[in-house]
Image: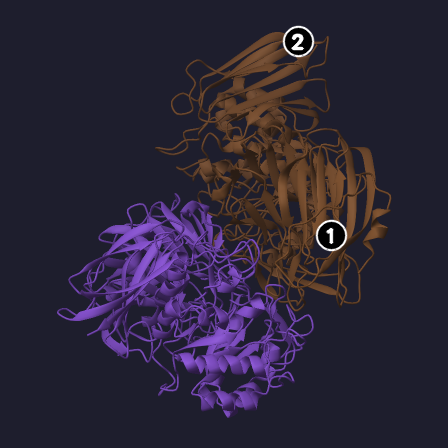
Chain colours: A brown, B purple
Amino acid sequence: MPNRLFALTALLLLSITVSTSVSAPASAAPTPPAPAVFSIASPDGRLTASITTDHEGRPSYRVDRNGAPVISSSRLGLILLDAPKFERNLAVSNPRTRSFDQRWEQPWGERRYIRNHYNELRVTLTERTRPFRSFDVVFRVYDDGLGFRYEFPDQAALKQLRIAEELTEFDIAGDATAWWIPAGEWNREEYLYNRTPLQEVGDAQTPITLRRQDGLHVTIHEAALVDYSGMNLTRVEAHRLKANLTPGIGDGKVVRNAPFHTPWRTLQISDNAAGLAMSSLILNLNEPNALGDVSWVKPMKYVGVWWEMHLDKKSWASGAKHGATNENVRRHIDFAAAHGFGGVLVEGWNVGWDGDWFGNGEDFSFTESYPDFDLDALTAYANAKGVQLIGHHETSGHAAHYESQLDAAFNLYQRVGIRAVKTGYVADAGQAKVIGSDGKLHYAWHEGQDMARHHLKVVTEAAKRHISVNPHEPVKDSGLRRTYPNWITREGARGMEFSAWGNPGNPPEHETNLVFTRLLAGPMDYTPGIFGTRTRPGSQVATTWAKQLALYVVIYSPLQMAADLLDNYEANPAPFQFIKDVPVDWDQTVVLNGEVGDYVTIARKDRHSDNWYLGAVSDDQARSLPVALSFLQAGRRYTAQIYRDGERADWKTTPEDIVIEEREVSSSDTLTLRLAAGGGQAIRFIAQ
Amino acid sequence: MPNRLFALTALLLLSITVSTSVSAPASAAPTPPAPAVFSIASPDGRLTASITTDHEGRPSYRVDRNGAPVISSSRLGLILLDAPKFERNLAVSNPRTRSFDQRWEQPWGERRYIRNHYNELRVTLTERTRPFRSFDVVFRVYDDGLGFRYEFPDQAALKQLRIAEELTEFDIAGDATAWWIPAGEWNREEYLYNRTPLQEVGDAQTPITLRRQDGLHVTIHEAALVDYSGMNLTRVEAHRLKANLTPGIGDGKVVRNAPFHTPWRTLQISDNAAGLAMSSLILNLNEPNALGDVSWVKPMKYVGVWWEMHLDKKSWASGAKHGATNENVRRHIDFAAAHGFGGVLVEGWNVGWDGDWFGNGEDFSFTESYPDFDLDALTAYANAKGVQLIGHHETSGHAAHYESQLDAAFNLYQRVGIRAVKTGYVADAGQAKVIGSDGKLHYAWHEGQDMARHHLKVVTEAAKRHISVNPHEPVKDSGLRRTYPNWITREGARGMEFSAWGNPGNPPEHETNLVFTRLLAGPMDYTPGIFGTRTRPGSQVATTWAKQLALYVVIYSPLQMAADLLDNYEANPAPFQFIKDVPVDWDQTVVLNGEVGDYVTIARKDRHSDNWYLGAVSDDQARSLPVALSFLQAGRRYTAQIYRDGERADWKTTPEDIVIEEREVSSSDTLTLRLAAGGGQAIRFIAQ
């Protein structure tokens, strides 16, 4: 057994205490000394993570804040296939700590500079009996949360790990309300959010957000999901959530050779909802930019041949309704050029949409256009007007088929000057398909190890051609945009199209759920901007027009669509002006207020001017929100261009009632934002 | 697509209706005709199971009782590895029905005769597109519940199934209270029962029992778990429970070649708790006796060298405290002979207990005795007195190691005349270990396919030697005792030993939970009969003495232990008399009253006399329960030997306060059973 006393002499930022653990079951053997407890605190000293073992050598950790528990004693460990589990008979030793404080710059983002400031504790867990396998647990504790992960060094007794299950648990200290979506069959993230007591959580995806009765907010998620299966959480009893990894393609949920480490298991912790949405923890726990100069990654707004298909006015498939025709695309290019949009997405341009592609995907060609779509001519036409086509690769989840054409597909786009591609993995009707390490075709899941691998392969192949990637039906976001800045945005939640398909669309609370759950993971290509809210007889988008504008600020995405039919924009130039004006790359972000699922107000400063933008959205309740403008530069005057719900505005009856007005403001002013039911408000603050 | 109209002309016991299913998402395609709904009702017409698909070909079933839903529309299907899932694009057709009504006789049991009366519906689900794979779903609907299973015929496109997950769901119609234990890591069944609202169920083992607000009771479990992984239930959302199969040894949770069928997924349904405990559904859904003449299977009571180890007075390991010495075993044989017990269990008789056997198991020999235990001499000594030794094989979960000695171990027991063996699979500290089909050692789980296989192998090998098997830490009971009557009892829940280990032991409600959960699966070797309730300083068995006696009637087990130290029986001959008198094989069983987790009263008629026995137990509440004796033979008089809690009886303070009295009764009498807190009552009715 490693010598614990030695460990106590290590250089520590914080004291290591020895406490008495819970009694083991009665035994005739003399009671051994209490296992050591190793702890590390955040830079501000308020948040503490501790790790210890019980008398049988079962490791556990806990998290305290201001001296009170956030995560009660919770298990750590792994169950392996074909090897004894890492769960018991472990000694914790050799604590190593370090402190880290760095400011880094995002190439694009919701803020330009991010401080990465944490204290780290690394301990080694070693089996007390043969074969003396070991692994490290590393904690990084920030003021706004923490991450921890397992690291498996190279060792004779542990060459390959076939992980049957992680034993990681999160025993939430206290009653809480939870916002979560079901894990389902690991092939779909597009669910409405459940809002339930913690003890009614089922099998949930992450991020899951919890609000304790005392107002403490905790979001559980993961960072840097690389070559591993995504973590879901199963509530096993009472307040105890347990990791439930997405299945692999057989042979264990994860198969890795040592040395390797798991993703970070993350806890974002705040006294209020706004604090969660201000956190950069997920990004901070990712590795720095691995791509070097990424000035070729260009945030932009775009329009597209897309919404009209969801309204059944056009089709992806060929024929009379085909949307991706030269004529229709040229119209979109002309519109983009006229109104300052950088891109035009075109779906349904390539061969493969005419069969039963849904859940299949084998028929897609990623290089062959339909005859009425002339890729070379259209890209030349667009480029001449300063507009880019945004490429589209729907795979129906057949990653293996896609990979077989990946080089050709990206080479084609590179040749014609396409700089961003939207990919699609609709697979809930079937399954994703990958080529396993055995070279054979396997069925897989969006959140499984092989799809995590696939997405990163696509992103790195795209990066070689200076192409950015926007996957829909993707693997979950875990902050990898820091390392691979061309992974520019993604979907991964119910987007606007659900409201095009008829009832039930997204309810008014949906976006206020997203801000404090899915969007904590990273940007989302939600595709806002719908003025034509009455989509089908008897159904409509649950929004006012002002809220649609506010979403451009509230929902962060460096690729941001103006999703509506061009006719609707042309017919309503006044509100459309905000969509034309709003940037997609930011210098600063301030979350001014918010409650999960109820409302939120966010202000962001343009990265390329001194202007600020504000978005506020509500659920189905009308609200008045006082907002101090103290985020504005002190002593400077701004012209506020206000797009607000009119007096009669209501998402059900009069969504189009919008008031557009200007006033002069300064940082000492307070505005009262009046939001209609399902409403919102968007403001552009022009620095004078 | 198979012709549904033809199906409608098949001979049906019940009408097949065509109803309109829920609308599919909006589509430009013309709406196809509504899928057919096929239904089957129970013999009494009250319970109905229906199966259909939605417009996308997703199959679902529902269960109604008296025209109101019990299980709302719930999914069916499978996810496979390396093959498309069976979930969508399926057509349901070719309904075949039959009726079955048979009375069969148990060789031993809680009742001698059982009526197996059901209506069966079989439908075929066929893919509407290539490769046109198909499977059948079979429903058997009884008056007291139903079972359904998947059957996979031999077919070119489906040779082997590697099942990633079953999609079977149970969407409980209405709010309910649930009694359940966590699935944990599939290596332990020994948990205290949770009593929570349905929407707080986590990841649960079966049987799980639900009580709806209108009093309807539903227990979900499975029958005939053969060569498949045990089903746990994860609550995925709201009231929706989903099958979560125990992992296999890699390469899918279950691997089977077609043709094969799954276990029955069972629903026991009753207006009250007593009705659940009267159900023979699980047995009825198992195959008849496959062993032929099983007159060699002998229910019996036994004492053992066992409880004293749990009290640390003796040890399994060799040395000064060794329990399995010739002297100590002879004392137990003498005691058994003097008091009419059929068996003496001896644990710790064999080599292997001296190392770190817990979670290991490689050191056990199943043929080599410790030097102070003379197997030949002791079995001869016992047999001469009409007593049998009960063998013991602790494996620590190392099934592979056990199997390597299985022939030798059973041959030895057969040679010395041992007719029953208790096996043990303590593996929650490590994992079970099996030899996979690849011939290699794999880690496994109690409820996984390979352990299910292992247990059946042990049982069939034992049957060849006319030996009965009583596994502890077993695979779950699914009624296989009907097919293999030498699988005589098992553990599979927290037994009495938890109360020997100190606090927290089993609470007073534990047995009233067991009756309506675990015991619905089959008999349990709970090991009652503790008079020495103060087991360790500061801890005690949460019971009165009268309750301990009542447990011999309440908890059905054909091997029933008198678990206490012999000294305690010798010192208390009056209450001990009931343990001596009570039978272990029954002609009839009547559950007279009960509420899950609160109390229960059961009367059973001896199979070999006209005497009846009654047991009533309470949780930590004192109660008065009026019980009509109408189960007794009308017109006959009985001497009731009553063992009841005394006036001062209370499990905490005065468990030993027991009153033993006699009175004459007849079937027209009503007794009021007064049960103390943690108390009970046992009555022997001697027919005159």
User: Residue B585 location, x and y as percent?
Assistant: 33, 76
- Circle 2 residue: A668
In the rendered image, residue A425, in percent from the top left (x then y), is placed at: 56, 50
Label 2 crowd (10 A; few <14 / some 14-19 / many >=20): some
Q: x, y percentage for residue A207?
A: 59, 41
Using the rendered image of the protein, determine whether residue B135 is visible from the camera's viewpoint: no
Q: Amino acid at mark 1?
A: Pro
Is residue A446 or residue A312 the one in the foreground? Answer: A446
Query: Measured along the vertical axis of the image, is residue A431 above or below residue B107?
Result: above
Tell me the quarter of the image containing the C terminus of chain A. top right
The numbered mark at residue B408 is none
Query: Is residue B556 found left or right of A99 in the rendered image?
Result: left
The amino acid type of the residue labelled 2 equals Ser
Mark 1 / mark 2, whichever is N-terminal: 1
Query: Which is in the foreground here, disc 1 or disc 2?
Result: 1
Determine the secondary structure under disc 1: loop
- Which residue carries the number 1 mark? A35
Where residue B71 appears, x then y in whole percent?
33, 53
Q: Chain of mark 1?
A: A
Residue visible at 56% across and 44% down? A373
Determine if marks 1 and 2 fall on one subunit.
yes
Q: Residue at x 51, y 88 (%)?
A: B379
Looking at the image, how many numbered discs can be counted on the residues? 2
